[in-house]
Amino acid sequence: NHAGGVPKFSIAPAVPGERPPQWSRSNALSSHYELKAMQGRQQMPVCWSPQDKGYYFSYAQAGEVSFVDPVNMASASVSITTRQAKALAPVVIAFTVPVGSRVYENVQGELFLLLRVLRHTRFALASAGQLLSPGTSINASGLSQAACGRLFRELWSNDPRGFPMPKGCYISAVGATGEAEERDVFIVFERFSGLRNRCRSPDGLCHYQLVVDAAVTASAAGENLIDLYTGCRFEGGGCQTEFEFYERGKALLTGSGTLPGPGL
């Protein structure tokens, strides 16, 4: 009954022998699909789009969805130990965690550190003195400390307790974004034993450094070679969502960049 004001509903009493009146909600939707974005976007429309004979038709906007970028790290950088382009040499990847990142104190799952090489043809990782082939990968199910030893020369922190002991490492041949030249390297930590946001150092900040062997092609100072991410590993349990990221750092090349080598 609607007579120019707020709608009013009346429910007839149940008839003996018949199904009693019930409320049926038809404006709620549940789905097994996850929504994932590669960059932050705000107030994107979500529409009702039922499938009809193999096609989807958008009838009306049902709401909005926003994707938020992870918090920026205090700093992140890549430092080469030789300026000769394509020369295989140690490379230092450094980052600093903001003191205010309380998430590291409260995370219940396995923390991970992701190194996303943006173009492996420009930043070619190596192991045991040999460049990794583009198809080299270690599945997440096969993560191990031995893999960390093959991928990293050294892991350092300014905290007297040292760099947290990794549970294991693994590497994918293709980054999660699907870009052909990306490569993802993961360091996974045991639950309640990951990166820290407060260290026993004079400035209280937690500074971390990772040393890898790599061959860097012609690159200019300030170029973004690697993106760093921290997050919760869903497969290890304790995470609120499957895609849970906490911080992001764009590791820029320090110094003066690379120089062409002999004959280049």
Image (cartoon, helix red, strand yellow):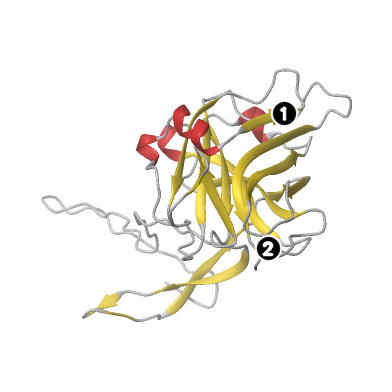
**Is the C-beta separation of discs 2 and 1 under 8 Å?**
no
- Distance in Å between CA atoms under marks 2 and 1: 36 Å
- What's the residue type where badge 2 is placed? Pro
| Residue 52: quarter of image | bottom left
- What's the residue type where badge 1 is placed? Ser
Could you say where residue 147 lies in the image, as x and y percent from the top left? 46, 34
Residue shown at the point (57%, 23%) measured from the top left: 165
Which quadrant of the rendered structure holds the C terminus? bottom right
Residue shown at the point (81%, 32%) measured from the top left: 205
| Residue 163: quarter of image | top right
Extreme right residue here?
202
Could you say where residue 137 lies in the image, as x and y percent from the top left? 40, 47
Mark 2 or mark 1: whose residue is earlier in sequence: 1
Residue 262's label in the rendered image is 2
Question: Horizontal placement of 163 versus 76: left or right?
Answer: left
Closer to the observer: label 2 or label 1? Answer: 2
Could you say where residue 104 lies in the image, as x and y percent from the top left? 65, 32
In the figure, 160 relative to 143: above or below? above
In the figure, 137 relative to 143: above or below? below
Element at label 1: strand
Q: How many marks?
A: 2
Question: Horizontal placement of 190 versus 204: left or right?
Answer: left
Residue shown at the point (65%, 37%) measured from the top left: 210
Question: Horizontal placement of 15 versus 107: left or right?
Answer: left
Element at label 2: loop
| Most foreground residue, 70 or 81 | 81
Which quadrant of the rendered structure holds the N terminus? bottom left
Q: Which residue is mark 1?
A: 157
In the figure, 4 relative to 251: above or below? below
